[in-house]
Image (cartoon, helix red, strand yellow):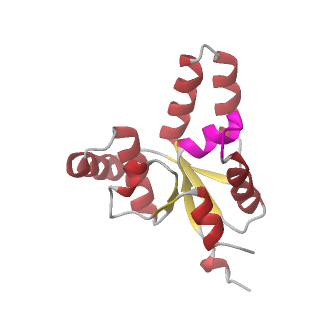
Amino acid sequence: MKSESAKPKVILDTNPLIKLFAQEAGWDAVQKILTKIESGEVEAAISVVTLAEIYYKYLQEKRPDLAETRTTDLRHAIYLKKLEIGEEVAVNAGAFKGKYKVPIADALIAASAYLEGLTIISDDPDFKKIPEVKTLTEKEFLSANKR
Protein backbone atom coordinates (compact mmCIF):
# COMPACT_ATOMS: atom_id res chain seq x y z
CA MET A 1 0.00 0.00 0.00
CA LYS A 2 1.30 3.44 -0.92
CA SER A 3 2.00 5.86 1.88
CA GLU A 4 0.16 9.19 2.05
CA SER A 5 3.24 11.04 0.77
CA ALA A 6 3.48 8.77 -2.29
CA LYS A 7 0.14 9.98 -3.66
CA PRO A 8 0.36 11.47 -7.13
CA LYS A 9 -0.02 15.25 -7.02
CA VAL A 10 -1.47 16.88 -10.11
CA ILE A 11 -2.83 20.09 -11.53
CA LEU A 12 -5.63 19.75 -14.04
CA ASP A 13 -5.30 21.99 -17.05
CA THR A 14 -8.41 23.56 -18.55
CA ASN A 15 -8.50 21.18 -21.56
CA PRO A 16 -9.37 18.01 -19.63
CA LEU A 17 -12.18 19.79 -17.79
CA ILE A 18 -13.63 21.13 -21.04
CA LYS A 19 -13.48 17.58 -22.46
CA LEU A 20 -15.38 16.31 -19.43
CA PHE A 21 -18.03 19.03 -19.47
CA ALA A 22 -18.64 18.67 -23.23
CA GLN A 23 -18.21 14.87 -23.19
CA GLU A 24 -15.67 15.24 -25.99
CA ALA A 25 -13.30 12.43 -27.01
CA GLY A 26 -11.33 11.32 -23.97
CA TRP A 27 -13.82 12.60 -21.39
CA ASP A 28 -14.10 9.15 -19.81
CA ALA A 29 -10.39 9.21 -18.92
CA VAL A 30 -10.89 12.56 -17.22
CA GLN A 31 -13.82 11.10 -15.29
CA LYS A 32 -11.62 8.21 -14.11
CA ILE A 33 -8.99 10.69 -12.90
CA LEU A 34 -11.63 12.70 -11.04
CA THR A 35 -12.85 9.50 -9.39
CA LYS A 36 -9.28 8.88 -8.15
CA ILE A 37 -9.12 12.48 -6.91
CA GLU A 38 -12.48 12.31 -5.13
CA SER A 39 -11.54 9.00 -3.47
CA GLY A 40 -8.32 10.52 -2.13
CA GLU A 41 -5.94 8.39 -4.24
CA VAL A 42 -4.66 11.51 -6.00
CA GLU A 43 -4.13 15.05 -4.69
CA ALA A 44 -5.26 17.64 -7.21
CA ALA A 45 -5.43 21.33 -7.86
CA ILE A 46 -6.50 23.76 -10.51
CA SER A 47 -5.14 27.22 -11.17
CA VAL A 48 -7.54 30.12 -10.84
CA VAL A 49 -6.55 30.75 -14.47
CA THR A 50 -8.63 27.68 -15.35
CA LEU A 51 -11.68 29.34 -13.84
CA ALA A 52 -11.12 32.34 -16.11
CA GLU A 53 -10.58 30.17 -19.19
CA ILE A 54 -13.72 28.12 -18.60
CA TYR A 55 -15.85 31.17 -17.89
CA TYR A 56 -14.56 32.88 -21.03
CA LYS A 57 -15.06 29.77 -23.21
CA TYR A 58 -18.74 29.53 -22.34
CA LEU A 59 -19.27 33.26 -22.79
CA GLN A 60 -17.77 32.92 -26.29
CA GLU A 61 -20.36 30.22 -26.95
CA LYS A 62 -23.04 32.62 -25.69
CA ARG A 63 -23.77 30.36 -22.72
CA PRO A 64 -23.48 32.58 -19.63
CA ASP A 65 -25.56 30.01 -17.75
CA LEU A 66 -22.88 27.35 -18.29
CA ALA A 67 -20.12 29.88 -17.52
CA GLU A 68 -21.69 30.40 -14.10
CA THR A 69 -22.55 26.75 -13.47
CA ARG A 70 -19.19 25.28 -14.47
CA THR A 71 -17.08 27.80 -12.58
CA THR A 72 -19.32 27.56 -9.51
CA ASP A 73 -19.02 23.76 -9.57
CA LEU A 74 -15.23 24.00 -9.74
CA ARG A 75 -15.03 26.68 -7.06
CA HIS A 76 -17.00 24.46 -4.69
CA ALA A 77 -15.19 21.21 -5.50
CA ILE A 78 -13.52 20.66 -2.15
CA TYR A 79 -11.29 17.93 -3.57
CA LEU A 80 -9.56 20.47 -5.87
CA LYS A 81 -7.14 22.94 -4.30
CA LYS A 82 -7.42 26.36 -6.00
CA LEU A 83 -4.00 27.85 -6.70
CA GLU A 84 -3.82 31.64 -6.67
CA ILE A 85 -1.51 33.79 -8.79
CA GLY A 86 1.02 35.38 -6.47
CA GLU A 87 4.29 37.13 -7.18
CA GLU A 88 6.35 33.93 -7.49
CA VAL A 89 3.90 32.37 -9.93
CA ALA A 90 3.76 35.58 -11.96
CA VAL A 91 7.54 35.90 -12.25
CA ASN A 92 8.03 32.22 -13.13
CA ALA A 93 5.23 32.44 -15.68
CA GLY A 94 6.96 35.41 -17.29
CA ALA A 95 10.14 33.37 -17.53
CA PHE A 96 8.34 30.39 -19.09
CA LYS A 97 6.50 32.61 -21.57
CA GLY A 98 9.73 34.36 -22.54
CA LYS A 99 11.83 31.19 -22.86
CA TYR A 100 9.31 28.87 -24.49
CA LYS A 101 6.87 31.21 -26.27
CA VAL A 102 3.76 29.61 -24.76
CA PRO A 103 0.42 31.35 -24.13
CA ILE A 104 0.34 33.30 -20.88
CA ALA A 105 -2.45 31.15 -19.42
CA ASP A 106 -0.36 28.02 -19.98
CA ALA A 107 2.70 29.75 -18.54
CA LEU A 108 0.74 30.66 -15.39
CA ILE A 109 -0.56 27.10 -14.96
CA ALA A 110 2.93 25.68 -15.58
CA ALA A 111 4.47 28.09 -13.06
CA SER A 112 1.92 26.99 -10.45
CA ALA A 113 2.74 23.35 -11.18
CA TYR A 114 6.46 24.04 -10.99
CA LEU A 115 6.30 25.86 -7.65
CA GLU A 116 3.94 23.29 -6.09
CA GLY A 117 5.75 20.23 -7.48
CA LEU A 118 2.70 19.05 -9.42
CA THR A 119 2.34 17.05 -12.62
CA ILE A 120 0.23 18.78 -15.25
CA ILE A 121 -2.61 16.70 -16.69
CA SER A 122 -3.19 17.95 -20.23
CA ASP A 123 -2.89 17.05 -23.87
CA ASP A 124 -1.96 20.65 -24.74
CA PRO A 125 1.42 20.40 -26.52
CA ASP A 126 2.52 23.80 -25.19
CA PHE A 127 3.20 22.26 -21.77
CA LYS A 128 5.63 19.76 -23.31
CA LYS A 129 7.78 22.75 -24.39
CA ILE A 130 8.50 23.54 -20.72
CA PRO A 131 11.07 21.03 -19.44
CA GLU A 132 10.83 22.33 -15.87
CA VAL A 133 7.43 20.69 -15.45
CA LYS A 134 6.18 17.15 -15.95
CA THR A 135 3.13 16.84 -18.18
CA LEU A 136 1.06 13.74 -18.83
CA THR A 137 -2.03 13.25 -20.96
CA GLU A 138 -5.02 11.77 -19.20
CA LYS A 139 -4.30 8.33 -20.67
CA GLU A 140 -0.59 8.52 -19.75
CA PHE A 141 -1.53 9.41 -16.18
CA LEU A 142 -4.02 6.57 -15.88
CA SER A 143 -1.53 4.12 -17.35
CA ALA A 144 1.13 5.20 -14.84
CA ASN A 145 -1.30 5.08 -11.89
CA LYS A 146 -3.21 1.83 -12.33
CA ARG A 147 -4.98 0.41 -9.29
Res 69 → quadrant: top right
The magenta stretch spans residue 38: no
Res 62 → quadrant: top right
User: Is residue 129 depicted above or below 117 in this figure?
Assistant: above
Q: Main secondary structure of the magenta part?
A: helix
Res 14 → quadrant: top right
The picture places residue 23, in percent across and down from the top left corner, at: 71, 38
Q: In the drawing, does residue 128 fall left or right of residue 144?
A: left
Q: In the drawing, does residue 43 fall left or right of residue 132?
A: right
Q: Which of the image's four quarters has the N terminus? A: bottom right
Q: In the drawing, does residue 109 fall left or right of residue 28?
A: left
Q: Residue at x 78, y 63 (%)?
A: 39
Q: Residue at x 51, y 31 (%)?
A: 52
Check the image and name the residue furthest to the front. Answer: 25
In the image shown, does 133 or 123 lie closer to the viewer? 123
Q: Which of the image's four quarters has the C terminus? A: bottom right
Magenta-drawn segment: 15-25
In the image shown, does 42 or 15 lie closer to the viewer? 15
